[in-house]
Amino acid sequence: MLYKDFLKIERECPFCEKTNRIIKEEDNAFLTYSLAPYHKHHLLVVPTRHTEFFEDLNDDETKSIEKLLHFGVKILKSLGYKDYTILVRNGENLGKSVRHLHYHIVPVALIGDVDHKGYEREIMTEKEIEILMNEFKVAEEKI
Ligand SMILES: [Zn+2]
């Protein structure tokens, strides 16, 4: 079944449903694998509580997630992978298909040599870096 068709099936949140696909569990999160993987060994770390956004995580959830990310990476290393990508999508516009927050751990995935608009990536100029650093500084002061 294609993933896009799988998503059309009416269901409760797939990450809130009881699953027997748990590889490891912590108090506030669990490690599982993707049913529609980018790669054969595509792992997912999911907070137990249904929460949509990264910024809504509490400290206990963050600790559990961090432990499981490390554990998931160890599994990939144990499987023989040297490289991996950890990815979190925050928002439907980025192709996030399940609203329940989840972290992807994907071996050997290349994000690519094109930017988010599909253009060849370019090195920033000194001026662009200066503007960027200033924007980060202003943003940091608002936190
Ligand atoms: Zn959920």
Image: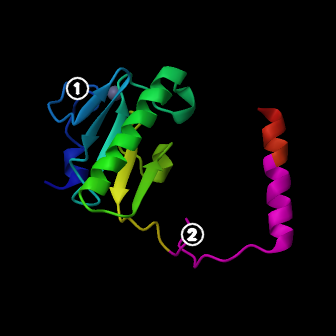
The answer to which of marks 2 and 1 sits earlier in the sequence is 1
| Tag shown at residue 17 | 1
| Left or right side of 63 for 40 | left
Q: Which of 45 and 119 is in front in this view?
A: 45
**Magenta region includes residue 80:** no
Around disc 2, counting alpha carbons within 10 Å, would you say few (fewer than 14), some (14 to 19), or many (20 or more)? few
The residue sitting at 28% across, 49% down in the picture is 75
**Secondary structure beneath disc 1?**
loop
In the figure, is residue 51 to the left or right of 8? right
Task: Give the amino acid type for the residue marked by disc 2 in the picture.
Answer: Asp
Which residue is at 46% across, 45% downward?
A: 92
User: Crowding near pointer 1: few (<14 within 10 Å), some, many (20+)?
Assistant: few
Q: What whole-number distance in Å separates the C-alpha atoms at marks 2 and 1?
A: 35 Å
**Residue 98: where, in percent of width, then height?**
35, 39
- Up/down of 45 relative to 38, above or below: above
- Where on the picture, by quarter, is residue 125? bottom right
Q: Quadrant of residue 56?
A: top right
Residue at image position (29%, 54%) is 76
- The spot of residue 61 in percent (x, y) is 46, 25
Q: Is mark 1 within 8 Å of ligand 1?
A: no
Tell me if residue 119 is in the magenta stretch. Answer: yes
Q: In this view, does 69 lie above or below 12?
A: below
Region of the chain picked out in magenta, as a range:
113-136
Q: Where is residue 141 in the image (x, y as percent from the top left)?
A: 84, 36
Q: Is residue 97 left or right of residue 51?
A: left
